[in-house]
């Protein structure tokens, strides 16, 4: 296997709601890159920012114990269980990459996107997005949860419709802090020369990409500016500068309003060592 050098750089503009975070954590066997995007229900005194900060704290504390893929899976599930208890009513979508030697493990929950540029220049959505449900699907899902506990409250035949409303109104049906129904989307793959990964909160992807829930190729017509961004830069540092220019040009030169939101992303460029 060719020796691939990783070049990465973060972009973060977190002044809107202060609920995004990014992190790079050294583990005994590799590097962990994470983006989280908080979301608040406004029913309590906790915010999505509290959840994002809690994720960062736990990852810093436990990074030295992550020696295998199963350890990051167990840790993320533990973070969800604990956050559900201490950050009641607040959530955070999460996406991350664990890089070990020539292998990468991608994981996500919620609407933090993991986009991949193939050496051919095609863009892919690597993992699905856990967006809010339509009412019929929400009720069916809530019915299956009767007898379980979510945020310390049992889902019963009498109150399951409240859970269904959470699925339709919150914007996410899966995220850190969501409770017993939490799950991780997962994918393994190998590093590859001239490939690029972008882990990004929706403040970055929403303005420049048509919504795509499922895994698969992203048509160029649905994300022309992201195609140009990822294909016209040879390293993460210039990609970050290009993203800054893209946001500025869209709002100022093109006079297109971009929804106020936190914007956080990590660019990961892979190149064969010369």
Image (tube, grey):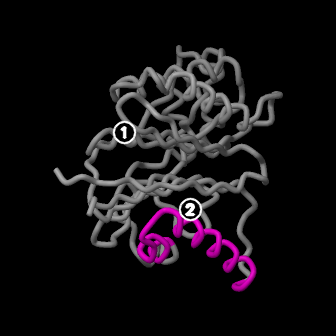
Viewport quadrant of the C terminus: bottom left
Above or below, 215 relative to 20: below
Above or below, 51 relative to 265: above
User: Is residue 167 inside the magenta stretch?
Assistant: no
Instruction: Find residue 153 and report its horizontal and vertical position in percent.
Output: 66, 16
Number of numbered discs visible in the structure rendering: 2
Secondary structure of residue under mark 1:
strand
Residue pushed farthest left? Answer: 1
Q: Which mark is residue 232?
A: none
Above or below, 228 relative to 44: below
Residue pushed farthest bottom? Answer: 253
Identify the residue shown where x is 68% and y is 33%: 53
Relative to 6, 156 lies left or right: right
Q: Residues within 10 Å of mark 1 (few under 14, many from 20)?
A: some
Mark 1, residue position: 186
Secondary structure of residue under mark 2:
helix
Mark 2, residue position: 205
Instruction: Find residue 248 and report its horizontal and vertical position in percent.
Output: 70, 75
Identify the residue shown where x is 57% and y is 28%: 60
User: Is residue 230 inside the magenta stretch?
Assistant: yes
Identify the residue shown where x is 57% and y is 41%: 23
Instruction: Find residue 206 and report its horizontal and vertical position in percent.
Output: 59, 63
Residue pushed farthest front? Answer: 274
Tell me the magenta residue range. 226-254
Magenta: predominant secondary structure element? helix
Quarter location, residue 242: bottom right
Is residue 155 visible in the rendered structure shown here?
no
């Amino acid at each position: 296997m060719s020796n691939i050098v990783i070049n990465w750089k973060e972009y973060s503009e977190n002044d809107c709601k202060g609920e995004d975070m990014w992190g790079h954590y050294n583990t005994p066997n590799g590097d962990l890159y994470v983006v989280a995007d908080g979301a608040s229900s406004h029913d309590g005194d906790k915010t999505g920012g509290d959840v994002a900060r809690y994720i960062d704290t736990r990852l810093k504390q436990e990074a030295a114990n992550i020696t295998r893929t199963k350890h990051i899976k167990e840790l993320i599930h533990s973070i969800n269980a604990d956050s559900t208890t201490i950050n009641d009513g607040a959530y955070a979508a999460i996406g991350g990459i664990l890089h070990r030697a020539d292998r990468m493990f991608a994981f996500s929950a919620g609407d933090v996107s993991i986009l991949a540029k193939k050496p051919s220049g095609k863009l892919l959505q690597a993992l699905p997005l856990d967006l809010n449900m339509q009412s019929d699907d929400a009720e069916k899902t809530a019915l299956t949860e009767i007898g379980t506990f979510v945020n310390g409250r049992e889902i019963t035949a009498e109150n399951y419709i409240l859970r269904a409303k959470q699925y339709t109104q919150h914007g996410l049906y899966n995220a850190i802090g969501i409770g017993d129904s939490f799950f991780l989307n997962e994918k393994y793959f190998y590093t590859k020369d001239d490939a690029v990964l972008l882990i990004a909160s929706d403040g970055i992807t929403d303005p420049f990409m048509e919504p795509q829930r499922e895994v698969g190729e992203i048509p160029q017509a649905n994300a022309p500016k992201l195609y140009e961004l990822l294909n016209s830069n040879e390293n993460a540092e210039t990609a970050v500068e290009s993203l800054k220019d893209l946001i500025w040009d869209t709002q100022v030169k093109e006079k297109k309003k971009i929804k106020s939101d936190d914007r956080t992303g990590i660019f990961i460029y892979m190149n064969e060592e010369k």
